[in-house]
């Protein structure tokens, strides 16, 4: 059993939050264990809770189309969420739930060791770009240590605000070039706060 599979087992057993007792399935995440790109959403929805898989509803279908647009398949990346259980009524994750799940996500990042982390939505963005506003930094990136952190709107935003669809599609198109640039881009100190780091875009 791989270290990631062992982590899944621990996540499924987790009962730290009230929502853990009401879930159908925990949704640890899925994808290539050596993925270059790690996409991090916010929380499982109804369909994800039913199947125990991330991004399998309409937002997930849109994400898969976005991946195809840059010649990637779902199986080539890794997809996870900030929290691993569905909040009741699809409400926003609570700060305690985010805190309780943070260790799981940090361990996933450690084990996968991606070259790029793409935050999808404001709760994911807040973990990596604290104090920032998604409307101002989407489509922009920072390199800290050996990882590029890149902010995007959540795919579900396009389902509710059709005007965001083109922005999301355009932001996705930047990912291959950002990865290519990363090889020549100097790394910054991981200990620095995001506000102190210069953001870049392509």
Image (cartoon, rainbow, N blue to C red):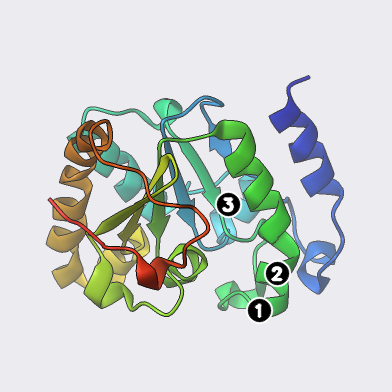
User: Which one is in front, 185 or 25?
Assistant: 185
Residue drawn at 49 percent across, 53 percent down = 190
Q: Is residue 76 above or below residue 105?
A: above
Which of pointers 2 and 3 lies earlier in the amino acid sequence?
A: 3
Q: Is residue 27 left or right of residue 120?
A: right
State the mark number for residue 34.
none
Q: Which mark is residue 48?
A: 3
Residue under the image location 79 percent in, 32 percent down: 6
What residue sits 31% from the left and 73% below the top?
134
Compared to residue 71, the image places residue 40 above or below, namely below
How far apart are the two marked residues, 2 and 3, measured between alpha carbons? 21 Å
Residue 168: percent from left, percent from top: 21, 58
Nearer to us of marks 2 and 3 is: 2
SS at circle 2: helix
User: Residue 31 in the image: x percent, y percent?
Assistant: 52, 31
- Kindly indicate whether the residue at mark 2 contacts the one at mark 1 (C-beta within 8 angstroms): yes
Q: Which residue is mark 1?
A: 95
């Amino acid at each position: 059993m791989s270290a990631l599979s062992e982590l899944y087992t621990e996540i499924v057993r987790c009962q730290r939050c009230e929502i853990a007792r009401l879930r159908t399935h925990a949704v640890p995440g899925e994808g290539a264990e050596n993925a270059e790109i790690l996409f991090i959403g916010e929380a499982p929805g109804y369909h994800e809770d039913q199947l125990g898989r991330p991004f399998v509803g309409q937002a997930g279908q849109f994400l898969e189309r976005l991946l195809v647009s840059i010649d990637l398949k779902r199986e080539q990346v890794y997809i996870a969420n900030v929290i691993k259980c569905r909040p009741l009524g699809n409400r926003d994750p609570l700060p305690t739930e985010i805190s309780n799940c943070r260790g799981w996500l940090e361990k996933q990042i450690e084990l996968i060791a991606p070259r790029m982390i793409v935050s999808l939505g404001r709760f994911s963005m807040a973990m990596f770009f604290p104090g920032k506003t998604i409307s101002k930094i989407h489509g922009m990136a920072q390199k800290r240590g050996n990882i590029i952190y890149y902010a995007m709107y959540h795919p579900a935003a396009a389902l509710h605000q059709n005007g965001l669809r083109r922005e999301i599609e355009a932001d996705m198109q930047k990912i291959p070039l950002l990865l290519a640039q990363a090889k020549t881009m100097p790394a910054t100190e991981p200990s620095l706060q995001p506000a102190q780091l210069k953001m870049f875009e392509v």
